[in-house]
Image: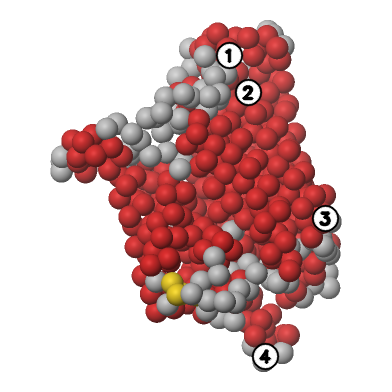
Amino acid sequence: MSPTLLFSFVIGYFIVLLGVAWFTSRGSNNESFFIGNRKSNWMLVAFGMIGTSLSGVTFVSVPGGVGTGNFYYFQIVIGYLFGYMAIAFVLLPLYYKLNLTSIYTYLEQRFGINAHKAGASFFILSRSVGATARLYLVINILQIFILDKLGVPFILTTFVILLMILLYTFEGGVKTIIYTDTLQTTGMLVGLVVCTIVIIKALGTDFSGALTLMSDKGYTQIFNTDVKAGSFFMKHILGGMFIAIAMTGLDQEMMQKNISVKNLRDSQKNMMTFTAVLMVVNFLFLFLGGILYLYASANNITTAPDDLFPTIALSDTFSGSIGVLFIIALISALFPSVDGAITSLTSCFCIDIIGLNKSKEDEKAKKRTRLKVHFSFAVLFFLLVLFFKFINDKLIIDFILKFAGITYGPLLGLFAFGILTQKKLNEKLIWAVCIIAPLLALMLDVLSSPGWYEKKLHIELGLQSISQSIFSGYVVGNELILINGLITFLGLLMISKKSTASIN
């Protein structure tokens, strides 16, 4: 299928999104933008959150990781289950009890303005870097497989995509993305299922036969029992649990949609329904990865893991049948994570950093400020994507994504300390703890498991021998966020004092 035809489907998809945005944003105001007037349908929120959780990177990286990591990723998904249960029955009751618009307002009520600003700032840092890194990786796929062939430069592709996202989120905010995320999740899941069916047929087998072939290759192994490995099952399950708590329950983007539901009970139903569907969808992504590797092996296809899915889907063999679906599914997986990120960052900056909700300005003045902030974050996203393109190194991006995850450690520590203790904090030292904790956690990660910096640090500076002598081969895995949170918690304990009162 020609690149021009594929690109026309992308443009058509954008036009549909703009139509939905126009329809849903009529009569919207600041409350609509921030929390959807607290009238969102819980079923739509639950379904749309699937697309937000599974970014375009997940769409290509989870299947691509099966070749070397088997189904070990599902250990993390099992951890998600426990994390989402904690969100539904611990965090959501707290958020609804306090009637929060921004979840970081809790930190101010509990510990003061410094804790509030620290929590919001770490979210803004983490979400800005993480969302733009994911955006870059998917734009790069579209660029390589479609737009380079049309002579469209990368900078123009990035500008147009961000402009479209800006246009359909500019007015309605959460009120709009509840519906656009539902549409995009549908596109992603249809693409996932159809691509899986077509490739199974190309292998000349059925679902059970494909599972048998994958089992023979060892791909279907879920649990890793090697204690020292980064993918040891307890590390993945614990890591997955706290990743879910921190990156969903303590994330303004995800919780902004949950607290837009009219009552706690519906919000809890939303969270548990989302959890059940997410587990099934993640298994399908792993299954897809297995059959992609089977097909690649049978047809002598060799490529980088992240390029495996697009290489096969857009090949001459399949481009006519699943090429369009792959592109639509890819951008459907990308946009919910980007449109929600820009919207939540706007909300967080307006409410938590500049205190727009406390301003005495009239509604029109507040809206002008909010629109300026929204536009500013779109510009920031544009510049960061160009920066990642300048680096043009996926290993660097992997490190940036890990860094983005590390920044949730202070949030985990702050919220845990607030919920589990009744102590007050020395406000002057909160920022110091929140900065030192992730730096210590990152140092532990560097020492235990060399990543992109292996040649620069472990070989040139001799840290490999130090790592072996300190950790005896133990590799820090997804439990890093838990370690980070614990360091923050202990740091907060050191600067705490007794209190007889508690916000919760």
**Amino acid type, mark 4:** Glu
Q: Which mark is residue 310?
A: none
The residue indicated by pointer 2 is 287
Q: Earlier in the sequence, mark 2 or mark 3?
A: 3
Tell me, yes or no, whether the two marked residues, 1 and 2, touch with CB atoms within 8 Å.
yes
**Amino acid type, mark 3:** Asp
**Does residue 71 sit above or below 147 in this rendering?**
above
Q: CA distance from mark 4 to mark 2?
A: 54 Å
Q: Which mark is residue 361?
A: 4
The residue indicated by pointer 3 is 266
Tell me, yes or no, whether the two marked residues, 4 and 1, touch with CB atoms within 8 Å.
no
Residue 129 locus on image (x, y percent):
47, 56
Q: Residues within 10 Å of mark 1 (few under 14, many from 20)?
A: many
Q: CA distance from mark 1 to mark 3?
A: 40 Å
Between 461 and 416, the residue placed more toward the observer is: 416
Q: Residues within 10 Å of mark 2 (few under 14, many from 20)?
A: many
Q: Report the mark closest to the observer, 4 or 1.
A: 1
Q: Earlier in the sequence, mark 3 or mark 4?
A: 3
Q: Secondary structure at mark 3?
A: helix
Q: Earlier in the sequence, mark 1 or mark 2?
A: 1
Q: Earlier in the sequence, mark 4 or mark 2?
A: 2
